[in-house]
Image (tube, rainbow, N blue to C red):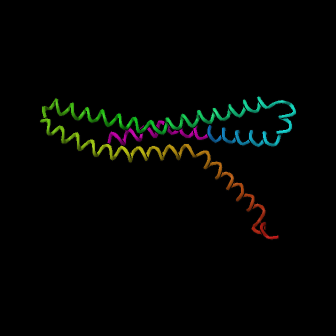
Amino acid sequence: PVIAVFAYLFARQTRKYARNLGNDRHLVEAAGMAHLQQTLQGQREITLYDATQHTLQISRSLFSGLARIQRQYQLLSTLPRFALELLAVFSLLAIVGIGVVNTTSSQDILVRVSLFTVAGFRILISVNRLLMSVQQLRYGHASLERVAQELHAQRTAFVADGPNVLQP
């Protein structure tokens, strides 16, 4: 139950953060693609007006923004594993502490700790994968939303033009 509560609270607390990172990534990538297209289309003007340094500065700014977003997402992805393992260690310490306070034999404490360790770390792997999957879904939500909008726009255009659009 402690792991489930932690997983729920972590997913709930990071919901907006992961979605905002995904939206930011989507915006920066779109701006980078637009900048690349403008650079390639306006290469003659860039050379003519000696704007190469300005163009490179914009590119560096976009790439550093994308790197910052990726770094934050990687931190968000590795944070649950670290926190879950830390929670497992403190739980083990609590089991040992309760066993010592209750003057349980060291053999009983060892059996409980080993059983908890095996079961806990098996569960931790699954919970970590689950949390990472949820974070990836939220992080990629902006891209999926964009694809859905484009598909809807194409469907709307197809319906508006009629079903015989493809015929000559």
Q: Tally the numbered discs.
A: 0
Q: Is residue 31 magenta?
A: no
Could you say which is closer to the camera, residue 129 or residue 150?
A: 129
Q: Is residue 85 left or right of residue 115?
A: right
Position of the N terminus, as image quadrant, is top left
- What are the residue bounds of the magenta stretch? 1-23
Magenta stretch mostly in which secondary structure? Answer: helix
- Measured as percent of width and height from the top left, residue 7 is found at 40, 41
Position of the C terminus, as image quadrant, is bottom right
- Measured as percent of width and height from the top left, residue 167 is found at 79, 70
Q: Residue at x 69, y 53 (%)?
A: 150
- In this rendering, the answer to whether 114 lies above or below 58 is below
Give the image quarter of residue 3: top left
Give the image quarter of residue 108: top left
- Measured as percent of width and height from the top left, residue 96 is found at 21, 33
Q: Residue at x 44, y 36 (%)?
A: 79
